[in-house]
Image: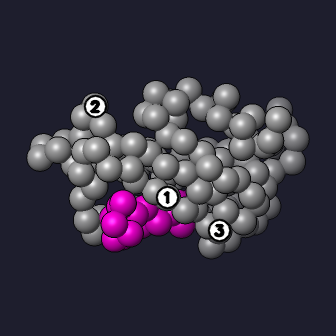
Amino acid sequence: MTRAAAMEIDLPFAALMGLKILEVTPERVVAELPVRAELCTRPAILHGGAVMAFADTLGAVATMANLGEGHGTTTIESKTNFFAGIPEGETARAECTPLHRGRTTMVWQTRITRADGKLAAIVTQTQLVLAPR
């Protein structure tokens, strides 16, 4: 089983959202999120909270791809800039890349785009590295 497949099994909230992880490496995580009515606000565009949850999941997955056995992570800061809405029926695509990968924290930037390639949001988040218990 690939690392990406193993992570998908352990992400029940991501599965509930419909998030599909396409690629996981220590340098990059790529995923898609079909925009369906349950994830939308009015008018029928992807809710800002869903955008943030999408990016938060990718930052956690990216951090885990860089950690040793038994380590964990939690988000300690997140900032989102919204640029364009993503309409219901489209698929949001995200790419998460590192800004900093340290021993105690990691900082990730996730770019979320619409089907037409237009930038919809950029999320910058800091993940705390948790030592094994």
In the image, what residue type sits under mark 3?
Answer: Pro
Report crowding for label 1: few under 14, some 14 to 19, many 20 or more residues within 10 A (C-alpha).
Answer: many
Q: Is residue 119 magenta?
A: yes
Q: Quadrant of the C terminus?
A: top right
Task: First in sequence, mark 2 or 1: give its number.
Answer: 2
Please state if 24 lies on the left or on the right of 55 as rendered.
Answer: right
Inter-mark Cα distance, 3 to 1: 13 Å
User: Which quadrant of the structure image shows residue 105?
Assistant: bottom right
Determine the secondary structure under disc 3. Answer: strand
Specify the label residue 94 is tagged with: 1
In the image, what residue type sits under mark 1?
Answer: Ala
Please say if 5 is above or below 116.
above
Q: Which region of the structure is painted magenta?
A: 109-128
Inter-mark Cα distance, 2 to 3: 30 Å
Query: 73 or 26: which is nearer to us?
Result: 26
Specify the label residue 98 is tagged with: 3
Observer able to see residue 121: no
Q: Residue at x 32, y 50 (%)?
A: 90
Specify the label residue 38 is tagged with: 2
Query: 119 or 103: which is nearer to us?
Result: 119
Do the CB atoms of the residues marked 2 and 1 lie less than 8 Å apart?
no
Determine the secondary structure under disc 1. Answer: strand
Query: 101 or 87: which is nearer to us?
Result: 87
